[in-house]
Amino acid sequence: MRTICLIFGFLTLMVTSCKTPEARKPVNIKTGSFLDESITRNKKLSAKEESRILKIIEQDTIHDYKASDGGFWYYYHTRDTTSTVEFPKFGDHVTFSYQLNDLNDNVIYTKKELDTVSYTIDKEELFLGLREGLKLMKPGEIITFLFPSYQGYGYYGDDNKIGTNIPLKAKVTLHTIKRESTLKN
């Protein structure tokens, strides 16, 4: 009898001590707060890099810098003002060589390391600034571009020599342009 009472008491205790689960209330997080902070941080970074680039331009009295619509600056070493050749467009195949430096003119990659590059405009991977810069060039031209980090390798770098948020200076020589229409057989 004592065992029955213990079992009955244990069961009563179990049934009365358990309560039904309550739904958890959601944690109140401002939606977009991370995104807002990221936007603010990136605007500050962009303004700081742009200020640094503009200071370099201001101090360089030798070159005539141009601002691109894409948010980078450039100047010509060699410019072709007589050729009627059009700038490269989507699908055109170009060959070019370039050297990458940081804004302090420290070499990151030499022309020899990067070799001559074959690239189909906007159909292959290439960092944004260089992709847009090539569209401003004619064969034989040599241009130096100043790219803010968001036009270069941005937050991630290149997993090799270019770190996080590094603005770049690229000296580019465009060798050839083959029109997309001539590439199709």
Image (spheres, helix red, strand yellow):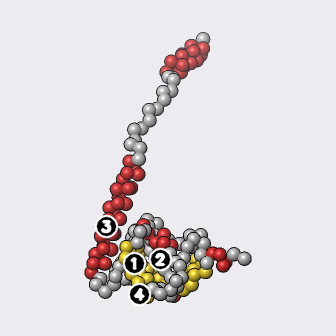
Residue type indicated by callout 1? Tyr
The residue drawn where x is 34% and y is 82% is: 64
The quarter of the image holding the N terminus is: top right
Q: Are marks 4 and 2 in contact (CB under 8 Å)?
A: no
Distance from disc 1 to disc 3, alpha carbons, whole Å, reads: 18 Å
Residue type indicated by callout 3? Lys
Distance from disc 4 to disc 3, alpha carbons, whole Å, reads: 27 Å
Q: Residue under circle 1?
A: 74
Q: Residue under circle 4?
A: 77
Earlier-in-chain disc, 4 versus 2: 4
- Asked whether, in this view, residue 147 is left or right of residue 2, the answer is left
Q: Nearer the viewer, residue 49 or 163?
A: 49
Q: Is residue 141 above or below residue 136?
A: below
Using the image, tell me which numbered label, if any, was put on residue 49.
none
**Nearer mark to the viewer, of 1 and 3:** 1
User: Could you say where residue 12 lies in the image, as x and y percent from the top left?
Assistant: 54, 16
Q: State the SS at label 3.
A: helix
Q: Is residue 159 above or below residue 42?
A: below
Badge 3: few (under 14), some or many (20 or more) residues near its Cα, within 10 Å?
A: few
Q: Nearer the viewer, residue 60 or 49?
A: 60
Q: State the SS at label 1.
A: strand
User: Could you say where residue 113 lies in the image, as x and y percent from the top left?
Assistant: 51, 85
Residue type indicated by callout 4? His
Residue type indicated by callout 2? Leu
Q: Nearer the viewer, residue 61 or 127?
A: 61
Earlier-in-chain disc, 3 versus 2: 3
Q: State the SS at label 2.
A: loop
**Nearer mark to the viewer, of 1 and 2:** 2
Q: Residue under circle 2?
A: 136
Q: Residue under circle 3?
A: 48
